[in-house]
Structures are given as structure tokens and as C-alpha cells.
Amino acid sequence: MLCLDCHKNNNEVIAWPNAAYKPDCAGCHANDYKQGPHKKVDSPTIYYTVAELKNCSGSCHMYADATMTRITKSRTGEHQPTGSF
């Protein structure tokens, strides 16, 4: 990533591209979010949202069904807030 990817002008202060999610990762990277790999329930298919994953810590659990009472798979955060995408 280059400085000019965020700093579009000669200014140290930049506006949050997605201010609703500041100061989390999604404040800048919400437009990079890809829904597909972030399933919450397999059938019926339910996905995690940007708001649920705004700090990029990953979708930790996959649930058995839409009641979301039984976890079938646990994932450790694939994206760490201090790591990179």
C-alpha cells in the first residue's frame, strides 16, 4: 500500500472513507469486504455483515442453523486487527 492510496492530497489528515465504522479496520476497508467466505449459517445461507466484522477479527463461528444456538465450526480470526489483509 502506498501513501497516496489514502492521502489523495497534501494533507496529513484524511477523511474516513466509511466513517460509520471508524476507528475500526472497516472505516477504511469496508469496500474491500467480500461476503462469500464469511458464512454464519450454511443452510439457509446466512452471511456475517461488515458491521459484525468491522474490526477484521474474522467470523469466529459457523452455526448449525438459523437459531444460531449450536456452533458447528470455530475459526480463529484469520484477519487480525493488527495484521494485514
Image (spheres, rainbow, N blue to C red):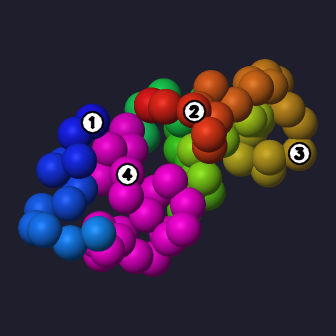
Between marks 4 and 1, how big is the CA–CA gap? 12 Å
Q: Quadrant of the C terminus?
A: top left
Q: Is residue 72 magenta?
A: no
- The numbered disc on residue 1 is 1
Badge 3 element: loop
Q: Which residues are magenta?
A: 13-34
Local SS, label 2: loop
Task: Residue 33 in the image: state x and y as whole percent.
Answer: 38, 44
Residue appearing at x 16%, y 50% in the figure: 4
Instruction: Work out whether 82 lies above or below 9.
Output: above
Whether 57 is drawn above or below 31: the answer is: above
Does the rendering let one see residue 8? yes
The answer to whether residue 26 is above or below residue 71 is below
Q: Which mark is residue 69?
A: 3
Please state which amino acid type lies under the numbered disc 3.
Answer: Thr
Q: Residue 44: give x, y in percent of width and height.
A: 58, 39
Q: Determine which quarter of the picture holds residue 41.
A: top right
Q: Nearer the viewer, mark 1 or mark 3?
A: 1
Mark 3 or 4: in front is 4
Looking at the image, is mark 3 or mark 2 earlier in the sequence? 3
